[in-house]
Image (cartoon, rainbow, N blue to C red):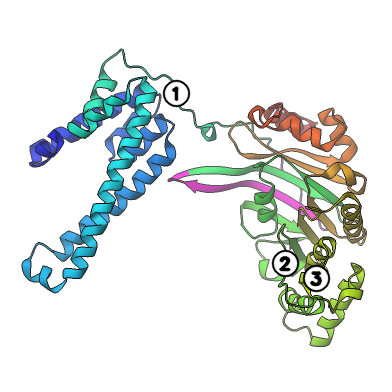
Amino acid sequence: MLESFFSSNIVGFVVIWVLTAAGAWMVFSKSKRPAWYALIPGIREYQLSKCADRENDGRMYLLISGLLYVTRLLDLLIDFGDPVVLERHLFGASVLLLVMLSLMIADFVYTIRIFSGLCDLFGVRKSWIWLVVLVGDFCPLVLWGFIKKFQPKFIYVDERDNEGAAISGITAKAMDTGLTVNIEERTATDFFKKRYLLRDIHLNIEPGHMVLLLGGSGAGKTTFVNAVNGYEKAKANIILNGTSIYDEYGKMKYKIGFVPQQDLMRGNDTVLRTMLDSAKLRLPANIPVKERRKRAMEALAFFGLEPVKDKLCDKLSGGQRKRLSIAMEYISKPDLFILDEPDSGLDGVMARELMEGLRKIADQGKIVIVITHSPDRVIDLFDDVIVLAKDSGLTGRLTFFGSIEKAKKFFEREEMEKIVLRINRKEEGGEGLADQFIEKYAEVCHE
């Protein structure tokens, strides 16, 4: 390869670097991407993959390039070129050589995949890849970048870079009783870039309310409940009955019950043994054994499971397993109860029976938040609804919080499932009105 010839001396290396950077600079400019990415090897190829809508290939290339750099560094540090060192560490040298060869092959493969995508970007034949193989990747980059006739056939747009709906400027006033949620943001780092998972969510839930958490797939429902219960902390202030969940988590974790979609019980344990084990985990360590057993029996009785207390969990019906999962958390009598699809897999009658049990918990002055994908069959049991949606920046946002009747008027729909369709993205089969409703809700709150 011509590239190898140039790279054999420092002048050739500099020439190759300049040509590659210059060609990539122009390609980025044509593709409306930040041109300075062209100056950083590895990052440059990753950004080229994004231009070609081959981001996954770029990520693999970046990972492989990093590992290849580490193995080359190890080779230099250990100095396997020294015959004495090589003789002493022949096995290690062989393994390192094998790893390096594998990584070099993988590096080459993903380079070809990225440039295959760039061929599609500029609408040229795949035979252009031979320039990469025989000359070097700088060659097609220079030609595509500097020759005017080569223009991108599409522009890659990362919707996560959009600002999304406007920030509301709302803050929920902390209450002495009930739940106050003020989530400024919940973020994650994605290839060195901050991504917003949730933003600008502010609400107050009164004690004794059963609340539906509604939203399409990817709207941030699970991220929201994890932020509220302290499992995955956000930049937020979450207050339950006058106490900060984040600041006093060691104490407040006993005040929160969370039932995931998948049950966590062992099939070969009895129902009572399962409850007693849960009591050890969910109740403070200073509670006596007799009190734990008493709490376990009370929870079983509340959910109608006392008659099957000696039965193996594997032998329970679907509805009984669901009720046992809830009882395992209810044993601590939490002030806040969060359930992720507790009615999943249940028929209408069993789902109704289960939700009525949750309604009874709310009527004890507790707060119950439920995620369900079949809300309309039990909607009369709920007091309020939290509606989350992805805005145009793909961030989970609060679209509405209030009573069921107000939600129907706000969205001009009589069914909860049709409300979801109003805010779902068009490519998800929805109407794509999330931004409009997010900003409309903010206006209502400011009135």
Nearer the observer, 143 or 14: 143
Q: Which residue is mark 1?
A: 155
Query: Measured from the top left, where is residue 135 in percent x and y?
Result: 17, 31
Q: Which residue is mark 2?
A: 252
Q: Report crowding for label 2: few under 14, some 14 to 19, many 20 or more residues within 10 A (C-alpha).
A: many
Residue 245 magenta-highlighted: no
Rendered view: 86 above or below 17: below
Q: CA distance from mark 1 to mark 3?
A: 56 Å
Answer whether residue 122 is visible to the viewer in this image. yes
Nearer the observer, 81 or 24: 81
Query: Measured from the top left, where is residue 204 in percent x and y?
Result: 79, 48
- Report if the CB atoms under discs 1 and 3 are less than 8 Å apart: no
Rendered view: 379 above or below 350: above
Q: Report crowding for label 3: few under 14, some 14 to 19, many 20 or more residues within 10 A (C-alpha).
A: some
Answer whether residue 44 is visible to the viewer in this image. no
Q: Is residue 53 left or right of residue 266?
A: left
Who comes first in sequence, dot 2 or dot 3? 2
Q: Amino acid at mark 3?
A: Lys
Q: Which residue is mark 3?
A: 315
The span shown in magenta is: 170-193
| Residue 314 numbered tag | none
Nearer the observer, 52 or 158: 52
Q: Is residue 175 left or right of residue 127?
A: right
